[in-house]
Amino acid sequence: MRIAVTYEDGKIFQHFGHTEQFKVYDIEDDKIHLTSMLDTNGSGHGALAGMLKENRVTTLICGGIGDGAKRALAEAGIKLYGGVSGDADQAVHGLLAGSLKYNPDVACSHHGEHHHEEGHSCSGHGEHHCHV
């Protein structure tokens, strides 16, 4: 299994389509075997699902994610665990242990030029309309 996490400064980045990096975890025997960084090089939204598929990612852990990106991931055969926040490594350990808290119905709808701020938890404030 290969798990990707939207990543910034050790934490799960909260907007899939704007992430600049994924931390990728190669899993063998239900343990982290190897980690690496995957730069998005400015790719956004729909292109990210294809990039993850090309890099043999089977599972994604992220914060907020829009419906279009969710569909693109499903079409690419990538299992989604959205609505997750906090430490990226701990989230992967939680997934492997079967204790990861996530929201299968996570959805973010972003309008205008508003971007997630440091520590934003996708709680529906301001111009964000997030349903977690």
Image: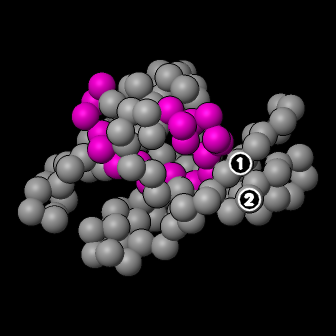
Foreground residue, 59 or 117?
59
Q: Which amino acid type is marked by label 1?
A: Cys
Task: Name which quarter of the figure residue 123 lies in.
Answer: bottom right
Q: How many marks?
A: 2
Residue 4: percent from left, percent from top: 36, 46
Which quarter of the picture shows residue 98?
bottom left
Is residue 115 toward the left or the right of residue 28 in the image? right
Residue visible at 76% across and 54% down in the picture = 130
- Mark 1 surroundings: few (<14), some (14-19) or many (≥20) residues within 10 A: many
Q: Residue at x 24, y 46 (%)?
A: 2
**Gap in Å between the C-alphas at discs 1 and 2?**
6 Å
- Magenta range: 54-72
Q: Which residue is mark 2?
A: 131
Q: Amino acid at mark 2?
A: His
Q: Is residue 41 magenta?
A: no
Q: Is residue 116 left or right of residue 64?
A: right
Circles 1 and 2, Cβ within 8 Å, touching? The answer is: yes
Q: Is residue 104 left or right of residue 76?
A: right
- Would you say 119 lies left or right of 48 here? right
Where residue 17 appears, as percent x and y from the top left, is 60, 35
Residue for badge 1: 108
